[in-house]
Image (tube, rainbow, N blue to C red):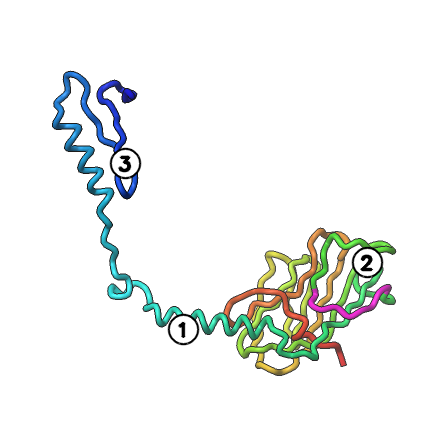
């Protein structure tokens, strides 16, 4: 077939590693020019490009070190997400008609993990506020950050306050592994926002996820 500019004719030759195009000149063109140029392209495309040894250059860690670190991360994730504390059943949840957690609770139950969907259908109307309280038992020592994206949320862990909302400034709290810490989550204006309520934390290794039920305990 004809080239768009009408200067050369394109023919396709199948090679073992793919298709390579060679061109034959039309009338009036030097036959050596097109041949040499496109055959060089074909040869270059078939030669494997040498790969630099990244570990020898020092740009990246050795594979053994990377495998060890990944194994440690996987072990930490397993400990944080597993039911290592079978007695943990969740937190005491209370829902109020008022928007500020005042007055008698219209619903009281045990919930864990705390994952309240904004689309939840309430038989007797949406509550105006909610409160979750109890104890949390961190599995690893280090600094934790607690989160609740609802703009009316406030979390208190061992007297350390964490404000809710996407743009809230996150504080940190130093926790010891295996100790019980009081935790309180209050959400005001529960029914005026389409944001759900999830009690999450960022663990010492940097991962953020919902606090599992196995690490949440009822108040005493």
Q: Quadrant of residue 203?
A: bottom right
Residue 42: say if magenta: no
Q: Which residue is labeled 3 in the image? A: 14
Cα distance in 3D space between marks 3 and 1: 46 Å
Residue 94, image x and y in percent? 80, 67
- What residue do we see at 42% from left, 71% from top? 69
Q: Do callouts 3 and 1 mark residues in contact (Cβ within 8 Å)?
A: no
Q: Residue furthest top?
A: 27
Residue 220, image x and y in percent? 76, 81
Cα distance in 3D space between marks 2 and 3: 71 Å
Q: Secondary structure at mark 2?
A: loop
Q: Earlier in the sequence, mark 3 or mark 1?
A: 3
Residue 56, image x and y in percent? 25, 66
Q: Which residue is labeled 1 in the image? A: 68
Q: Quadrant of residue 147?
A: bottom right
Residue 146, image x and y in percent? 61, 68
Q: Which residue is labeled 2 in the image? A: 127
Nearer the observer, disc 3 or disc 1? 3
Q: Is residue 82 above or below residue 34?
A: below
Q: Which residues are magenta?
A: 106-114
- What residue do we see at 86% from left, 64% from top? 106
Q: Earlier in the sequence, mark 1 or mark 2?
A: 1
Label placed on residue 97: none
């Amino acid at each position: 077939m004809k080239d768009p500019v009408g200067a050369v004719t394109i023919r396709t030759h199948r090679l073992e590693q793919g298709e390579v195009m060679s061109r034959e000149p039309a009338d009036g063109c030097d036959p050596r020019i097109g041949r040499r140029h496109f055959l060089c392209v074909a040869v270059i495309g078939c030669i494997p490009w040498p790969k630099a040894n990244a570990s020898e250059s020092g740009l990246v860690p050795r594979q053994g070190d990377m495998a060890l670190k990944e194994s440690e991360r996987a072990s930490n994730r397993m400990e944080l997400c597993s039911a290592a504390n079978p007695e943990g059943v969740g937190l005491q949840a209370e829902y109020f008609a008022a928007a500020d957690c005042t007055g008698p609770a219209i619903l009281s139950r045990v919930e864990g993990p705390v994952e309240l969907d904004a689309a939840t259908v309430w038989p007797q109307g949406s509550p105006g506020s909610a409160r979750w309280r109890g104890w949390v038992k961190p599995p690893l020592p280090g600094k934790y950050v607690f989160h609740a994206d609802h703009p009316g949320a406030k979390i208190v862990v061992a007297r350390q306050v964490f404000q809710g909302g996407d743009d809230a400034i996150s504080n940190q709290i130093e926790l010891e592994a295996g100790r019980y810490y009081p935790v309180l989550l209050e959400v005001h204006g529960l029914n005026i926002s389409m944001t759900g309520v999830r009690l999450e934390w960022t663990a010492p290794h940097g991962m953020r996820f919902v606090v599992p039920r196995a690490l949440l305990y009822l108040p005493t």
